[in-house]
């Protein structure tokens, strides 16, 4: 059942990504010859609206084949205004960007659905107070519920940390204790900490930790839209930073996961709850959007770079350069895939 869920989720994400390319291409009048879910041997196809819609043998990706677009023949020019290569560079950039953008839109839709169903979050209830910390000196205690900081209402624990880190000067906490609301003035201090990448950092803290108490957020449609936007942006930033840290060597290559890890995570999420499945699907969708925008030849981001070069230099890169960089891009992608599979197998053996 887990494998079926994995294939369905992956096919859904690929479909949405390729649908972005397809709709943008059709908007500019380009003929889309093939819309494929999967690579390799064709298993099923149907001709509709001038396009061959198909499922292929290897369900680990997909593509749309537009008239006049062929990476193996970069100099290909097909006659007619419905050809990809006859379009202006800025139009091609929009078509290329439309795929990753569709993934971001899909993630936002999924996060909105999560918010409307009832997203879970940690309660803003204190579970631990560090001795001699600013919180302890101000008299905060375990089981105190934080209602407001200065003039900002608090609904979940995540908001507490964000507000403290981004604030300046002393803070006024409104606390609910034994049914009574009290106030405390706390002056955060700069302390040593770690970020999600386990790097040593310094940040404003008051010395408290959350209680293991989960609440369900009851959000209005407008609040759900804000929630969806914030989650999509935060996820995108996290993945961009993750790629940056991987390149810098902060994240070891052993942390790279492949299709086995993705399948395992999706399978476990599907067995947990619909919220968990929607959450991991949204995160993978953002991941696909970000990774496809990387300036690696053979990815959307690489092709966008080629078109930006054409706009700046007012000429296309030579066929030889295009082919060389595309081959390099495929080697990089192939190496990353093999690394992910190797790490997956190593984890399974352990």
Image: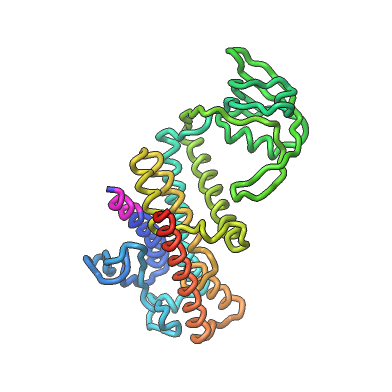
**Residue situated in front as seen by the camera: 208 or 16:** 208
Please name the residue shown 38% across and 62% down the image.
18
Q: Is residue 162 above or below residue 71?
A: above
Residue 203 in the figure: left or right of residue 209: right
Percent x, y of residue 249: 61, 61
Q: Is residue 223 visible?
A: yes
Residue 310 percent across, percent down from the top left: 56, 78
Q: Residue at x 54, y 68 (%)?
A: 295
Here the colouring is rainbow
The x, y position of residue 266, in whole percent, is 37, 49
Asked if residue 150 lies left or right of residue 55, the reply is right
Q: Which residues are magenta?
A: 2-9
| 243 sits left or right of 116 in the view | right
Which residue is at the front of the view, 111 or 76? 111
- Does residue 267 sit above or below 255 in this rendering? above
Q: Residue 46: within the magenta?
A: no
> Among all residues in the image, which is located at the extreme front?
350
Q: Position of residue 60 (x, y in %)?
A: 35, 62
Residue occupying the point 46% across, 33% down: 120
Q: Residue at x 33, y 52 (%)?
A: 6
Residue 53 seen anywhere in this rendered image of the structure: no
């Amino acid at each position: 059942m887990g494998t079926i869920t994995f294939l369905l989720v992956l096919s859904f994400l690929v479909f949405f990504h390729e649908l972005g390319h397809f709709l943008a291409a059709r908007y500019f009048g380009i003929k889309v010859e093939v819309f494929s879910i999967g690579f390799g041997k064709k298993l099923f196809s149907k001709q509709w609206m001038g396009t061959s819609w198909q499922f292929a043998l290897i369900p680990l990706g997909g593509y749309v084949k537009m008239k006049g677009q062929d990476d193996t023949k970069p100099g290909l020019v097909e006659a007619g205004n419905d050809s990809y290569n006859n379009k202006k560079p800025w139009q091609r950039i929009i078509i290329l960007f439309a795929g990753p953008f569709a993934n971001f839109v899909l993630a936002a839709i999924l996060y909105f659905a999560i918010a409307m169903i009832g997203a879970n979050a940690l309660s803003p209830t204190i579970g631990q107070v560090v001795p001699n910390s600013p919180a302890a000196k101000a008299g905060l205690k375990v089981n105190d519920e934080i209602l407001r900081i200065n003039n900002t209402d608090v609904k979940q624990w995540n908001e507490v940390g964000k507000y403290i880190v981004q604030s300046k000067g002393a803070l006024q906490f409104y606390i609910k204790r034994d049914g009574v609301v009290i106030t405390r003035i706390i002056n955060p201090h700069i302390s040593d900490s770690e970020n999600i990448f386990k790097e040593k950092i310094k940040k404003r803290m008051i010395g408290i930790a959350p209680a293991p108490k989960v609440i369900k957020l009851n959000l209005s449609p407008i609040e759900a839209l804000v929630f969806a936007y914030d989650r999509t942006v935060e996820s995108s930033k996290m993945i961009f930073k993750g790629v940056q840290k991987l390149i810098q060597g902060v994240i070891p290559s052993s942390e790279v996961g492949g299709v086995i890890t993705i399948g395992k995570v999706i399978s476990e999420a599907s067995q947990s709850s619909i919220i968990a499945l929607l959450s991991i699907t949204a995160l993978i969708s953002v991941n696909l959007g970000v990774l496809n925008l990387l300036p690696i030849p053979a990815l959307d981001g690489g092709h966008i770079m080629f078109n930006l070069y054409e706009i700046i230099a007012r000429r296309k890169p030579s066929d030889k350069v295009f082919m060389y960089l595309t081959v390099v891009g495929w080697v990089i992608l192939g190496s990353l895939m093999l690394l992910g599979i190797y790490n997956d197998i190593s984890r399974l053996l352990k």
